Image: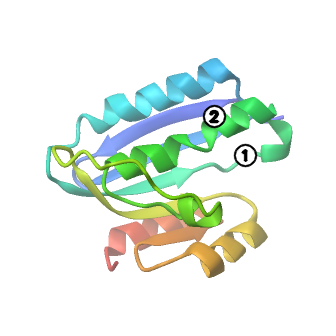
Amino acid sequence: MMAEIMHTTWNSTEQILRTRISGILHQEQVEAWEQSLEQVSRQIPKHLDFTMLIDIQGYEVSEQDKAVHQQQRVVIPTFLARHDFEVGFFRLFEVQNTISPNLDRARCVAVAHVHHDCNKMALYNQNLGRSNERFFCQLSEAEAWLQEGIF
């Protein structure tokens, strides 16, 4: 079993917001992760375009409590919707995005998702990927794609 990891960082030079979760999480940990995501995102200057790297390597849905996973899986789509980015989650579950962007905040222009299941990421990339949202199983590839900045 992998240790729980939850953290978020902002790199103002690269203009990349990075967040990571891993291991078996509990409700309080998901809430703390969500709060850290919001807190760190306040460091991003208003009206700036930024990119985001979401690293969930070591997070397995089958190992999570169902309620905790349901809580976790809406954190990123909700966060991104408030930053004017409609993540593939809405298309995957055929859910209409009813979250209005906060136009007084920074705007997310590209997202790289990373998970250790290469087959799942290839399938997501095929079905949900687009020019500004990609799915990777290698962190280094996701980093390189974001740093290239060709969306």
For the point 62% across and 44% down, the residue is: 73
CA distance for labels 2 and 1: 18 Å
Q: Is residue 140 or residue 37 the one in the foreground?
A: 37
The amino acid at mark 2 is Gln
For the point 66% across and 57% down, the residue is: 115
For the point 37% across and 32% down, the residue is: 38
Of callouts 2 and 1, the N-terminal one: 1
Residue that label 2 marks: 71
Q: In the picture provided, is 104 more to the left or to the right than 95?
A: left
Location of residue 49 by image quarter: bottom left
For the point 22% across and 42% down, the residue is: 44
**Residue 147 x %, y %:** 35, 68
Location of residue 102 by image quarter: top left
Q: Is residue 60 or residue 12 the one in the foreground?
A: 60
Q: In the picture provided, is 99 more to the left or to the right than 88?
A: left
Nearer mark to the viewer, of 2 and 1: 2
Q: Is residue 144 or residue 92 the one in the foreground?
A: 92
Say which quadrant the C terminus sits in. Answer: bottom left
Residue contact between numbered discs 2 and 1, judged by CB atoms under 8 Å? no
- 33 vs 74: above or below: above
Residue that label 1 marks: 58
The amino acid at mark 1 is Gly
